[in-house]
Image (tube, helix red, strand yellow):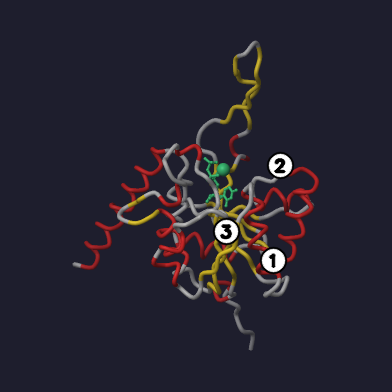
Amino acid sequence: MTTAVNPVETSYWVIVPAAGAGKRMGADKPKQYLPLSGKPLIAHTLENILHWPGLKGIVVAIAADDTEFATLRCAQDARIQTVTGGAERADSVLAALDYLSEREAPETSILVHDAARPLVSVADIRKLLAAAPMALLAQPASDTVKLSQTRGGKTEVRETLPRDQIWLAQTPQKAPLGKLRETLLQGLAENSTAITDEASALERAGFHPELVAACRSNFKITHPADLLLAEALLQHRAVESSLENNL
Ligand code: CTP
Ligand code: MG
C-alpha cells in the first residue's frame, strides 16, 4: 500500500523581515506598527501566520532600535522568536537564516513573508506548500507592461513587454534553509543591489522557483492608500464572517 504524502503536513519555519523604516509610507513610525483595524499591522500578519497548517515557528527580524515589538500581545507566543535585522531586507532575512541554520537541518523548508503583507489567504499558503520545494506567490500582470528609458530628462516608453510572461513577485517565498542561505550569501557578495527577494538570489545560482498565482488581496502595504484598502478588506471579511456565523 502506498501512503499519500500530504505536502501541507510538511513542517516549515517562517521568516518575517520587519526591520524596515517604511519610508514610502511617510508616517512617524515604521509602517509595521501603524494601526490597522484596531491593532498594529504586524500583529495581523503574525496572527495570520500562526494559523498556517504545519507551521513550526516564526523568526521575526526587527530593527536594532525597535522598542514596539515586545509590546505586542503575539510577541509572547512561544512559537515566535526575534533576531536583529540589517540595513537591507536581504540582510534581515540572512540574520534569521543564520539563527535557524544553528538549530535546524539544511533541508528544512523556509517561507519568507513580508511583515507588510497581512492579507495573504490560507488557501494560497496551501497552494504554495504543495508546489515545488522552491516556489513563490506572485501576481500575473494585468496591465500592459512598458519598459521605460530616460531621454532629454523625460521618462518615455522604450518598448512593450509580452504581458503573458510578466509576474509580480510577492511573498511568501519558499526554499530549503541551506540552499537559501548559501545563495543569499553568494548573491549579496556578488551584487547586493540585485537581491531584492529570495527568488532573485536563487535565480542567480541557476534555480528556477515555481510561480504560484496568488489572490489579489496579497498586496504589500507600501503607500498610505494601501493601508486604507487593507482596512476596507478587513472590514468586509469581518462582516462576511459574522454573517456566516449567524446563518
Ligand atoms: N525590511 C527589513 N529590513 C530592512 C528593510 C526592509 O526587514 N532593512 C522588511 C520590511 O520591514 C518589510 C519587508 O522587508 O516588512 C518589505 O520591505 P518594504 O515593503 O520595502 O518595507 P520598508 O523597507 O520598511 O519600506 P520602504 O522601502 O518604503 O522604506
Ligand atoms: Mg524597502
Question: Among all residues in the image, which is located at the extreme top?
Answer: 152
Q: Amino acid at mark 3?
A: Ala
| Mark 2 element type | helix
Q: Residue at x 55, y 57 (%)?
A: 62
Q: Which residue is mark 1?
A: 177
- Is 183 placed left or right of 214 in the picture? right
Figure quadrant of residue 109: bottom right
Mark 2 neighbour class, 10 Å CA radius: few under 14, some 14 to 19, many 20 or more: few
Which mark lies nearer to you, 3 or 2? 3
Image quadrant where one finds the C terminus: bottom left
Q: Position of residue 164 (x, y in %)?
A: 59, 39
User: Which residue is depicted at the point 67% across and 75% down?
Assistant: 103
Question: Which residue is under mark 2?
Answer: 194
What percent of the width, then of the height, locates residue 90?
66, 51
200 up-or-down from 7: above or below: above
The amino acid beneath tag 2 is Ala
The residue labelled by disc 3 is 61
Viewer-proximal residue among 15 and 78? 78
User: Which label lies toward us, 3 or 1?
Assistant: 3
Residue at coordinates 73% horizontally, 70% vertically from top-left?
106
